[in-house]
Image (cartoon, grey):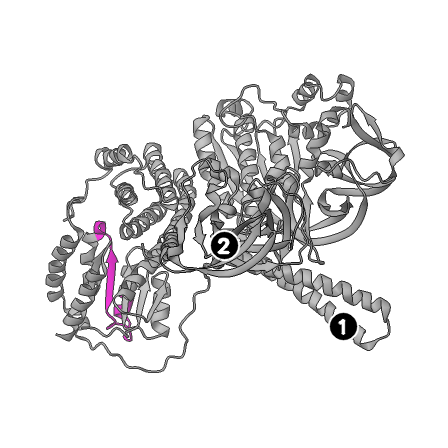
């Protein structure tokens, strides 16, 4: 398991990464397309009371019950409840699947390996653990997210 | 050398051991491998299907390796099937017994693929002479 | 490590764990029948097997320890050592240590475990004990841990060669042509009857069947709607028939798939002989454990959930039930107490009972304690029947043990047993007779994966209540709800029933202010309470599903027992009744 993850990372630094990009607030974020299962538009969320604030609820994805994460709340941002498109990107980590609510979808871009720089070393950044690296496009910077961390509950991290 | 297409029966009550032995044999290029859980099951298989080689554990429930070996040597159809016995060091004194019963060679756990290869080659060389 | 080796290692862990678990039982049998050579041989073989495979995997500590135990076992088997409880203890300790070592491998924990003192003990036993007969002198090769196996093997080879040359029989065997007659064989090679399947794969099949059932339900509903609309349309009649057929097949398929997940309760029972033996020894009691019906099969999910309650009941029986030998003698009872653990299937349930022939529950003591704890008034206490008194042992914080021991009385009591069983839709029944013994009977559904539920609605959201907890549902008017000390209650046929509003349970603000409600009367433990909801939706059979990943943990919610997907494809959360009851705890004494 560990070695596979490692291999992936190594590959990323050499090869270009197909990245699904999207907006949360004004920022452009990206997720490696290999972690993206699908994008859903019509969904029916069942709220789950008494769990983390950033959990919007669960939905039925062809027979699987998948948690839906409100990305704004996940990033400790103000959520005005407005959804431009209200799309859900369903992503997969090594042991989990979840839907991420994003404001709007941008495009799939090919970021060359050499254009990806490691994440800035901000030790105290609350969201630093979610960031895999920064992808420099011609006109914009894409914050590339780490799915493993996004889908990992807070308590477990504290424990580690 | 030996023909890697030969059909081998691996006898051991411990599934993990069967896998290990199989794995070792596969490393040596053997692909036609079947498994049996004990001497009884092995004899059934040997009698219903043709095997070229048997690699067997010693200690097994129902029917142990030695009993199986004796029955193989007593069976006119099977008596010439080479049998390689897998033993632990503690059982060495028993090896004599196995040799008397007609074992072709034996191999001590844990072994490498290289040792296994040597053992099989030894058996086939002796068979040639 | 290559993936193949990794897979082999996984297999080794699973298989070794099974072997070690089965060993516990063997040891207990051995103590009863110390001269049983077959038994010793079986144990020897098990340890030997583990050693062999561990050697390949480079698990040196496992090799060393199994090797040392094997030596002792071999001497026992060959009669060079006579069995004694002391030897058995050390071997048991070794088996326990092996379990720890295997656990470490499983958790990829590479830190070495301290096995030296144990190795010394084994060595001492191997050398020091007085052999019953003269040790047979064999040309045994001295065990030298430093020596290379390879070179030893080669040395042995020479021996093989020399014996071979002096053995006529082997000569013929060796010279025989390899290629035998290639006659057609009548019988096909035998296929193995059982295969090991990854639980995840089974779960996938199980989930898919669940989906199929949901799809079938939708189809059935639709075809019924059509049948109402066009009762005489031949196509609709055909559709109805097809739906019915699908219903039949999917039910059968569900049963068949269920069966693949069934495991004998032996998996849980296995640990008890050892546990009873150890506890009895440490308590100076003589106890015989009799196990019946260990082949009874139940769903994997049930197996995982019955272990803890059973451990508790059996510990209780040893600690509080069975008297010490002297006391039993005085009572004209056999000095050895009996615990009978039995399992059987009754319809869609499994019934497991734990019976002991000990002192039984002292109901007068229970009566006194109930008054002391303020659970009932002295007057009420006098009126309580034996059955009602027995139920008090499941009351939280109720323990009749005078002193706390390390066996039971650790703060977790019978109430936890009952709650845990209720969580998996099980019940427990008690029968006790002072001086004669106690019998606990647990009844559980064969599977926890499919349950009947009552669907209810509150604030336009649907929730499911397990039907096993539901007694009835009544419609009430808002004006019928009154409040006593902050606890809402209703009067139902003259009886006071505390209620909790589902909207409050799930953290919504006070209900939508509807004038009328439905109250679902549920039972948990021996207490009844009502759950107020806006609307009843209907009854539905649902497949309990887990939520992907671990970002949501329903256990943290304290309200939900699980989730499911309805025929319409909506996710519905299932209410955990014992948890819901926590919300009316404050007023319980008054309303019981």
As drawn, C233 above or below C477: below
Which residue is pictured at 53% across the width and 34% down the height? C338
As drawn, A60 above or below C464: below
Q: Quadrant of the N terminus of chain B?
A: bottom left
The front one of C337 and A154 is: A154
Residue B79 counted in the magenta span: yes
| Element carrying mark 2 | strand
Tell me the number on the disc at residue C239: 1
Name the chain letter of the residue that bears numbered label 2. A
The answer to whether residue A79 of the structure is visible from this angle is: yes
Residue range highlighted in magenta: B70-91
| Element carrying mark 1 | helix
> Which residue is disc 2 drawn over?
A31
User: What is the x, y in percent for residue C166?
Assistant: 11, 65
Which residue is pictured at 78% across the width and 21% down the height? C380
Which residue is pictured at 88% across the width and 33% down the height? C480
The front one of B128 and A130 is: A130
Q: Quadrant of the C terminus of chain B?
A: bottom left
Crowding at label 2, few (<14), some or many (≥20) Cα neighbours within 10 Å?
Answer: many
Tell me the number on the disc at residue C555: none
Name the chain letter of the residue that bears numbered label 1. C
Crowding at label 1, few (<14), some or many (≥20) Cα neighbours within 10 Å?
Answer: some
């Amino acid at each position: 398991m560990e070695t596979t993850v490692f291999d992936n990372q190594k590959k990323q630094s050499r090869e270009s990464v197909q990245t699904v990009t999207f907006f949360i607030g004004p920022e452009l974020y990206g997720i490696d397309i290999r972690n993206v299962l699908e994008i859903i538009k019509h969904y029916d969320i069942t709220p789950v009371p008494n769990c983390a604030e950033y959990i919007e609820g669960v939905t039925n994805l062809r027979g699987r019950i998948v948690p839906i994460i409100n990305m704004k709340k996940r990033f400790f941002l103000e959520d005005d409840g407005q959804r431009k498109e209200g799309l859900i990107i369903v992503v997969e980590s090594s042991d989990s699947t979840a839907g991420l609510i994003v404001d709007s979808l941008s495009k799939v871009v090919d970021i060359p390996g050499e254009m990806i720089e490691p994440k800035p070393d901000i030790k105290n950044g609350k969201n630093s653990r979610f960031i895999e690296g920064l992808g420099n496009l011609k006109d914009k910077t894409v914050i590339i997210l780490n799915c493993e961390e996004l889908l990992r509950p807070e308590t477990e991290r504290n424990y580690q | 050398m030996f023909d890697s297409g030969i059909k081998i029966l691996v006898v051991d009550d411990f599934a993990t051991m069967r896998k290990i032995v199989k794995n070792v044999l596969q490393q040596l290029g053997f692909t036609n491998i079947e498994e049996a859980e004990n001497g009884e099951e092995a004899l059934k298989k040997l009698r219903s299907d043709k095997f070229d080689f048997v690699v067997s554990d010693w200690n097994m429930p129902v029917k142990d390796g030695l009993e199986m070996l004796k029955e193989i040597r007593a069976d006119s159809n099977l008596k010439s099937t080479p049998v390689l016995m897998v033993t632990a060091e503690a059982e060495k004194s028993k090896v004599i017994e196995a040799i008397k019963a007609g074992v072709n060679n034996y191999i001590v756990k844990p072994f490498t693929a290289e040792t296994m290869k040597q053992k099989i080659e030894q058996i086939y060389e002796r068979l040639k002479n | 490590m290559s993936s193949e080796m990794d897979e082999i290692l996984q297999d080794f862990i699973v298989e070794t764990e099974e072997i070690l678990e089965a060993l516990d039982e063997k040891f207990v049998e051995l103590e009863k029948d110390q001269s049983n050579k077959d038994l010793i041989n079986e144990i020897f073989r098990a340890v030997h097997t583990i050693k062999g495979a561990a050697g390949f995997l480079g698990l040196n500590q496992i090799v060393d320890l199994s090797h040392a135990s094997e030596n002792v076992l071999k001497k026992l088997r060959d009669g060079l050592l006579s069995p004694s409880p002391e030897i058995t203890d050390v071997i048991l300790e070794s088996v326990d240590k092996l379990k720890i070592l295997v656990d470490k491998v499983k958790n990829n924990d590479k830190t070495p475990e301290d096995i030296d003192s144990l190795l010394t003990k084994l060595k001492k036993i191997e050398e020091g004990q007085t052999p019953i007969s003269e040790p047979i002198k064999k040309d045994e090769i001295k065990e030298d841990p430093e020596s290379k196996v390879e070179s030893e093997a080669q040395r042995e080879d020479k021996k093989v060669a020399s014996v071979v040359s002096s053995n006529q029989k082997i000569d013929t065997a060796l010279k025989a042509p390899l290629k035998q007659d290639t006659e057609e064989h009548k019988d096909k090679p035998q296929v193995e009857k059982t295969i090991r399947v990854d639980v995840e794969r089974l779960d996938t099949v199980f989930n898919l069947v669940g989906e199929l059932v949901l799809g079938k339900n939708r189809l059935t509903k639709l075809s019924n709607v059509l049948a109402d609309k066009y009762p005489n349309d031949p196509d609709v009649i055909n559709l109805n028939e097809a739906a019915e057929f699908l219903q039949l097949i999917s039910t059968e398929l569900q049963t068949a798939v269920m069966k693949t997940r069934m495991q004998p309760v032996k998996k849980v029972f296995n640990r008890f002989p050892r546990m009873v033996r150890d506890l009895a020894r440490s308590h100076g009691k003589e106890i015989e454990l009799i196990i019946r019906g260990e082949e009874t099969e139940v769903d994997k999910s049930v197996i995982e959930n019955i272990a803890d309650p059973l451990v508790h009941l059996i510990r209780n029986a040893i600690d509080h039930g069975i008297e010490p030998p002297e006391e039993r003698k005085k009572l004209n009872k056999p000095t050895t107490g009996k615990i009978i653990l039995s399992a059987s299937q009754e319809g869609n349930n499994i019934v497991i009972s734990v019976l002991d022939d000990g002192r039984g529950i002292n109901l007068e003591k229970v009566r006194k304690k109930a008054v002391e704890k303020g659970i009932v008034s002295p007057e009420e206490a006098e009126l309580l029947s034996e059955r009602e008194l027995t139920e008090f042992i499941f009351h939280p914080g109720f323990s009749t043990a005078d002193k706390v021991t390390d066996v039971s009385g650790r703060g977790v009591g019978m109430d936890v047993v009952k709650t845990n069983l209720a969580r998996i839709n099980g019940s427990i029944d008690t029968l006790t007779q002072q001086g004669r013994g106690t019998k606990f009977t647990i009844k559980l559904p064969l599977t926890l994966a499919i349950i009947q539920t009552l669907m209810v609605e509150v604030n336009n959201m649907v929730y499911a209540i397990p039907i096993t907890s539901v007694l009835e549902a009544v419609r009430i008017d808002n004006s019928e709800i009154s409040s006593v000390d902050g606890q809402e209650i209703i009067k139902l046929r003259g009886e006071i029933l505390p209620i909790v509003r589902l909207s409050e349970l799930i953290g919504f603000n006070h209900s939508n202010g509807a004038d009328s409600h439905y109250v679902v009367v549920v039972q948990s433990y021996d207490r009844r309470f009502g759950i107020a909801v806006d609307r009843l939706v209907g009854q539905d059979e649902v497949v309990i599903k887990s939520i992907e990943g671990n970002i949501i943990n329903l256990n943290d919610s304290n309200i939900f027992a699980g989730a499911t997907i309805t025929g319409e494809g909506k996710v519905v959360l299932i209410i955990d009744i014992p948890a819901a009851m926590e919300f009316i705890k404050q007023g319980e004494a008054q309303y019981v």
